[in-house]
Amino acid sequence: MSQSIALILAPDGQPLPETVRQWLDERHLPTRSVGSGDDVMSAALRARPRLVICDARQHPIAALKTCRRLKADSFTGIVPVVMATRPDDAAFAAAFDAGADEVLREGLGGHEVLLRLDALLRRSDRDTYVHPSTRLPGTIEIETEIMRRIEGKLRFAVCYADLDHFKEFNDRYSYYDGDRVIRILSKILHDVVKGTCGEDGFVGHIGGDDFIFVIPVEQVQETCAEIVTVFDTLVPYQYSEQDRRAGYYFGKDRRGQLHKVPLMTVSIGVVTNERRQFTHAGQVSELATEMKSYAKTLYGSVFSVDRRGDGPAGANPVTPVSTQRAREER
């Protein structure tokens, strides 16, 4: 069973309301009907369905219990649940209390049913494709945005931002403090990108301390320089006063050896289509990862722009831009 299937709980085999069946057919969503809550959980845990429809008109207790079970599990909890109920207010309220994402009462107009179900899937996609901590779009939306610009023949830059010495920070302080730093970085990226590029800027969160932002080529210098400057201004205040004043602290490496750990910095690898022709997001992702890795070999907070073209390797070397240089050129 693929993720595009609609799973239907119908204990007595009763057919779905005609408007719901029509909507499923028009959206080309294949269905699978099961007769018990155990069957729903088993199927949903094996492969997350597109949505679950519980028919609570004849057997409301079984439907409500199944909905609660789905929503209580972290894997199946994000699956949207639609509850078909009797028209009375008590059944309507009970369905929402059980965690249903949408409730369709008998007698609801056909056009409204279609609109409600379409809106449900849009909300589900939005919630699924964003990172739960930062609420930024995830990898699926990042790839979609890159492909949109490739297919639209726009001049763009993909910038891969990553923190340096973040693991050591987590080890010295706590995962709670580390999560706060990630939220701070996400806020910096969002505010700077939107402030310099407006609606032409996109910010996504791959996971952990890895972020992607996509901007017009012309905005690379201004945007990346501002991100580096703001980050270097704010990050020292995430440390204790003692560590902040020293500019480092002692931490252990994987072999248990003590060494000086500097304060966190941010490294940004930048890839543009000024000198390259891209056909899919995977090409961009590979180069952005390469540039990010190169930036991390440099000292301090930096952004490094790939100036190479599609010609012979080495004809146009990468161009590192340090924090200091970025400030001078602003």
Image (tube, helix red, strand yellow):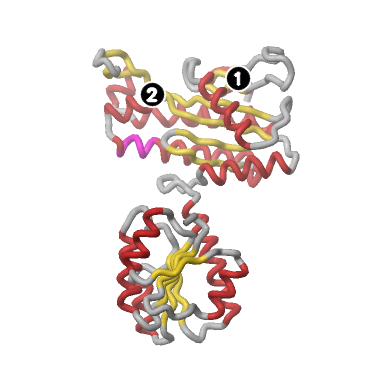
Report which quarter residue 271 is drawn in: top right
Q: Which numbered disc flags the more N-terminal residue, 1 or 2? A: 2
Q: Residue at x 38, y 22 (%)?
A: 263
Report which quarter residue 330 is drawn in: top right
Q: Which residue is drawn at 32% across and 36% down?
A: 177
Q: How crowded is mark 2: few (under 14 residues within 10 Å), some or many (20 or more)?
A: some
Instruction: Identify the element where label 1 is drawn.
Output: helix
Q: Residues within 10 Å of mark 1 (few under 14, many from 20)?
A: few
Position in image of residue 184 (x %, y %) = 43, 38
Magenta extent? 176-181
Whether residue 309 is situated above or below residue 191 in the rendered picture: above
Our reading of the magenta stretch's main secondary structure is helix
Report how far apart the C-alphas of labels 1 and 2 lie in the structure.
Answer: 26 Å
Residue 106 relative to residue 166: left or right: right
Instruction: Give 123 or 28, whichever is nearer the viewer.
Output: 28
Label 1 sits on what residue type? Answer: Glu
Position in image of residue 56 (x %, y %) = 38, 78
Q: Residue at x 42, y 74 (%)?
A: 83
Report which residue position mark 1 lands on.
328
Can residue 213 be seen from the camera position used here? Answer: yes
